[in-house]
Image (cartoon, rainbow, N blue to C red):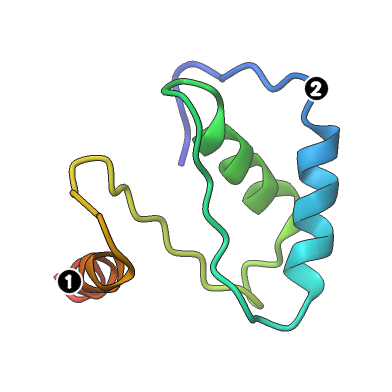
Amino acid sequence: MKYSKKAAFINRKKEISFLKKWIKEEPEYILFFYGPKSSGKTTLINRFIQEHLDKKEFDVKFLNLRETFISSYKDFIQAFFRNEYL
């Protein structure tokens, strides 16, 4: 995807290093990104995918759950699979 305006990407070496290590481990956990609005979560994920993942090896899915009320693990699973198959 091409954007008309590039987001600033400053001082994220620690996070990128963590993601590079985490992605090499055998899948065991779901990794959540959370933080204040406009803190760079999506930019960090997009940059990591573009620069560090082999698109042939990984199938990346992005779910925006901002408008979904999730109060339990069951709610999360239902939202995940409901979005997956729409």
List the single residue furthest toward the front: 72
Dot 2: within a 10 Å radius of its alpha carbon, few (fewer than 14), some, or many (20 or more) residues? few
Residue at 65% in and 40% down:
47
| Left or right for 56, reference 85 | right
Q: Quadrant of the C terminus?
A: bottom left
Dot 2 falls on a residue whose secondary structure is: loop
List the single residue furthest toward the left: 86
Q: Name the residue under label 1.
A: 82
**30 vs 47: above or below:** below
Residue at 26% in and 72% down:
84
Dot 1 falls on a residue whose secondary structure is: helix
- Determine which quarter of the picture holds residue 44: top right
Residue at 76% in and 64% down:
22
| Left or right for 13, reference 72 | right
Q: What type is the residue that disc 1 sits on?
A: Arg
Q: Are marks 1 and 2 in contact (CB under 8 Å)?
A: no
**54 vs 42: above or below:** below
**67 vs 77: above or below:** above
Q: Residue 39: give x, y in percent of width and height.
A: 53, 22
| Left or right for 28, reference 20 | left
Q: How far apart are marks 1 and 2 (CA)?
A: 36 Å
Q: Mark 2 points at which residue?
A: 11
Q: What type is the residue that disc 2 sits on?
A: Asn
Question: Going from the N terminus, do you reach mark 1 or mark 2 first?
Answer: 2
Closest to the observer, 34 or 86: 34
- Determine which quarter of the picture holds residue 76: bottom left
Q: Residue 5: give x, y in percent of width and height.
A: 49, 16
Q: Residue 52: give x, y in percent of width and height.
A: 76, 55
- Determine which quarter of the picture holds residue 62: bottom left
Residue at 53% in and 46% down:
33
Closest to the observer, 10 or 34: 34
Q: How many labels does the image show?
A: 2
